[in-house]
Image: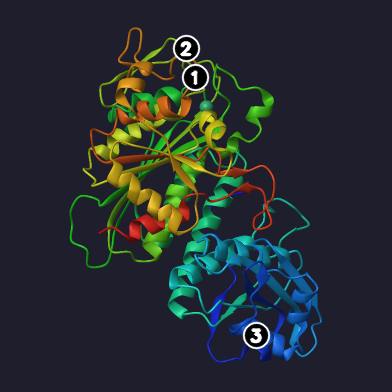
Amino acid sequence: MTPDAMPPQPPITVDATTKVAAVTADALVIFVCSRDGRADLGRGPAAAIDAATGGLLTRLAAAGELHGKPGECLALLAPPGLQVGQLVVVGTGAAAPSDPAAPYRAAATATRHLAAKPRTAVALVADPDWTARQTEQAVAGAAVGMVGQDLFRAERRRTPFPVVWLGADAGAVERGARIGAGVNLARRLVNMPPDDIYPASFAATAAAVAADTGLGCEIWDEARLVREGCRAILAVGKGSHRSPRIVLLTYRGPGVPEGPPHLALVGKGVTFDSGGLSLKPPDGMLTMKCDMAGAAATLAAAATIARLGLPIRLVAALGLAENMTGPAAYKLGDVIRARSGTTIEVHNTDAEGRIVLADVLDVVRGLGPAGIVDAATLTGACVVALGTEVAGLFTNDQAWCDRVATAARAVGEPVWQLPMYPEIYDDLIKGEVADIKNIGDGRWGGAITAAKFLERFVGGIPWTHVDIAGPAFAEKPRPWTDGGGSGAMVRAFVELARGLG
Ligand SMILES: [Zn+2]
């Protein structure tokens, strides 16, 4: 499969005139919230549909079949009084204070269900109580839910379809469609096999996406990495015949004057992680094509920020390497002098992401951004601490971390901060013969010692590290998404960028 640019997306349009009950379509989707544990049909589209169907929704609610709970998805075939093949009623949970993730997940649940068969037209009705942000998230969710993992399947399990939104602001729909395309780009990159997505092909994809979205793009190949002194990322790549790359994407919003970046995004892109000589067991290796999810999220967020025309200066850096066991592979006990001059003692070649990021963070630091955020599937320890759905946050600057957390929570991406006490953790990564070693003392606090390692390379610039080892990849499907790449942090990074500049 050859790398291409933004994934194609069926049209997402707005209908501002048709009344909800008069829609003709394969399917009509409405959203119902719950109040005191009961479906709230009081007003808006649900009330109009209830009236047009002779009280169908009221009867379902009275019979205990419809509650408006999150995840609830009721498909009613050939509903009386409507001109649609089916009516899909999706629950969003309590109305207020609304879970910011609810519209995204509810819309994705509906389209995931409908995409099981080909459709020519599906209408979705925005909840009149949604804010513009929530409408955007619902539109994005609808675009994401209908896309599955069928990259190589003759018989597709999900067939994307055109969507018409009713009762929604046209600008919010347009923005939501772009955000959804960004999430789908990250998912597709993560889902692609490691023999297709490797450092050079990932870089080529980034260049295609950049050309498509108006980002500047500079690719550092092996020779350039040697010239730039990027010995850390080069060391990790030595065991593979596919050499590493660093990709630098730049963006300046319309009318924004030149200057240092407001935001630097950095992504870990280990396109396949065998563990190197500290080899992973087969079970742990199977999903290691996902070890580039941070770089995928970073590229997708940058592309989306550019497509939204946000008024900021952005740099996004991808550290791309394959961690293999070839004859030149880096070894335990090796000492690497990173680009910054800091020396790194290798105690475990499977803790390679932080070594890759050491050089990428140093490159970005040199550009003088106001704030850095990196995304990395960095540690299993973070998954042990927080589970598979919550990203870990680590920082050297509380105000900056708070902004990242606020942005993530505003779009319903769960995050949780872990501590960075210098007096407790700094000593744990001291090397025997070098400045630092690439794992902590023993197994405790492994997510934090990894963050402590990264902190050494940001030069005191406000920085937040997001460990997405849990949420980046879903082993099992959920009602609102197929398994595989999730596109975690794309929406959060776009939201963060909106508050800057
Ligand atoms: Zn690893």
Disc 1 residue type (three-letter): Thr
Pinpoint residue 247: horizontal percent, then vertical percent: 38, 43
Looking at the image, residue 32 sits to the left or right of residue 203; the answer is right
* Dot 2 or dot 1, earlier in sequence: 2
Outermost residue to the top: 433
Residue at x-position 27% and y-position 67%: 254
Residue at x-position 57% and y-position 50%: 486
Residue where numbered disc 1 is placed: 349
Disc 3 residue type (three-letter): Ala
Q: In which quarter of the image is residue 78?
A: bottom right
Q: Do the residues labelled 3 and 2 touch (CB within 8 Å)?
A: no
Q: Are marks 2 and 1 in contact (CB under 8 Å)?
A: yes
Looking at the image, residue 199 sits to the left or right of residue 27; the answer is left
Whether 128 is drawn above or below 240: the answer is below
Q: In terms of secondary structure, where does tag 1 sit? A: loop
Q: In terms of secondary structure, where does tag 2 sit? A: loop
Q: Which disc, if any, is residue 332?
A: 2
Pinpoint residue 315: horizontal percent, then vertical percent: 31, 49
Residue 85 visible to an observer of this rendering: no
The Cα–Cα distance between marks 3 and 2, rounded to whole angstroms, is: 67 Å
* Dot 1 or dot 3, earlier in sequence: 3
- Image depth: mark 1 or mark 3 in front: 3
Disc 2 residue type (three-letter): Leu
Looking at the image, residue 456 sits to the left or right of residue 158; the answer is left
The Cα–Cα distance between marks 2 and 1, rounded to whole angstroms, is: 7 Å
Residue where numbered disc 3 is placed: 47
Q: Is mark 1 within 8 Å of ligand 1?
A: yes
